[in-house]
Amino acid sequence: MIIVYSLGGSFLAGQSPEGLKQYADELKSLAKEHRIYVVVGGGRVARDYITKARVLGASEVFCDELGIGATRLNSALLIAALGTAAPQEVPDSYSKAALLSCDGKVVVMGGVSPGQTTDAVSAMLSEYVRADRLVIATSVDGVYTSDPEVDPNAKKFESMTSKELVSLTMETEMKAGSRSPIDPLAAKIIERSSLPTSVVDGREVANLRKGAFGGHTGTEIRQG
Ligand code: UTP
């Protein structure tokens, strides 16, 4: 199977070296039988830098570039944890990512162009490499009707169609560093490519495998 993971920088980059090793070990183990690609988010560093730059008067696209820098920095940290199991560079395009992929190796990349998040990168990479599945591992345990951190009545979808995901995400704000579970562009790509996708709680390493092969308690995105 070809599996693409979108790993949120918020939970990944905050890990101790031992924690990072656990994610790396799970990815290595998956790469023994499957072709694995990982796209890493910008997390706290991206948010901090974007917030400061915006106050300093930077344009949104400049803030996006800062965010991309943070995603690449976090990617390099995961590559350090993977050691020889990963090509030792962060590709800056889908074609380079595909070229770097070979048996048993985990290709890790970050953002590529302004105006989107790494969820969109992971969806487009999935199209590019014709992935069988996309697993979006975030610091929320699935897709909710509204932000569960703000709305106590928010309900989690056990499953939903890609069309429903598109309508839900279209309501969210599109700004550098915006806080939304999945960006609308990612949802559109998932819809157009009928990509089997799961959204799981990435704070639990075991959910990487469950997100790909079942048994998770997140949200399953169906075609339609
Ligand atoms: P993230 O993908 O980390 O966004 O990119 P996020 O939604 O905050 O993800 P989590 O919380 O880590 O899961 C951080 C910022 O980098 C810019 C955007 O400004 C984004 O908000 N970015 C990232 C781009 O402009 N283009 C990219 O391809 C990737």
Image: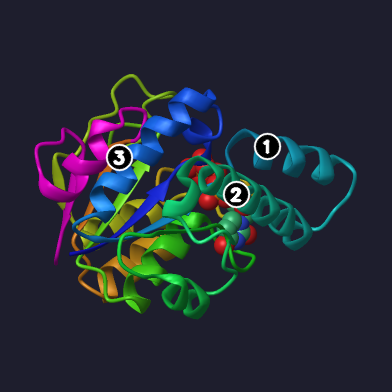
Q: Is residue 104 magenta?
A: no
Tell me where residue 224 appears, x and y as whole percent.
14, 67
Residue at x 23%, y 54% (from the top left corner): 32
Spatial separation of the CA atoms under disc 3 and disc 1 = 25 Å
Residue at x 20%, y 71% (from the top left corner): 194
Q: Mark 3 vs mark 1: which is more N-terminal?
A: 3
Q: Secondary structure at mark 2?
A: helix
Spatial separation of the CA atoms under disc 2 and disc 3 = 17 Å
Q: 74 left or right of 38? A: right
Quick one: 134 or 87, which is closer to the camera? 87
Q: Please, is residue 116 above or below residue 11 in the view?
A: below
Q: Amino acid at mark 1?
A: Val
Q: Mark 1 vs mark 2: which is more N-terminal?
A: 1
Q: 68 left or right of 23? A: right
The image's mark for residue 76 is 2
Tell me where residue 111 appears, x and y as whole percent.
57, 60
The image's mark for residue 26 is 3
Residue lying at the far front in this picture: please name it.
Answer: 84
Classify 10 Å Cα crowding around label 2: few (below 14), some (14-19), many (20 and above). some
Classify 10 Å Cα crowding around label 1: few (below 14), some (14-19), many (20 and above). many
Q: Amino acid at mark 2?
A: Ala
Spatial separation of the CA atoms under disc 1 and disc 2 = 14 Å
Q: Quadrant of residue 221?
A: bottom left
Tell me where residue 183 appears, x and y as whole percent.
45, 55
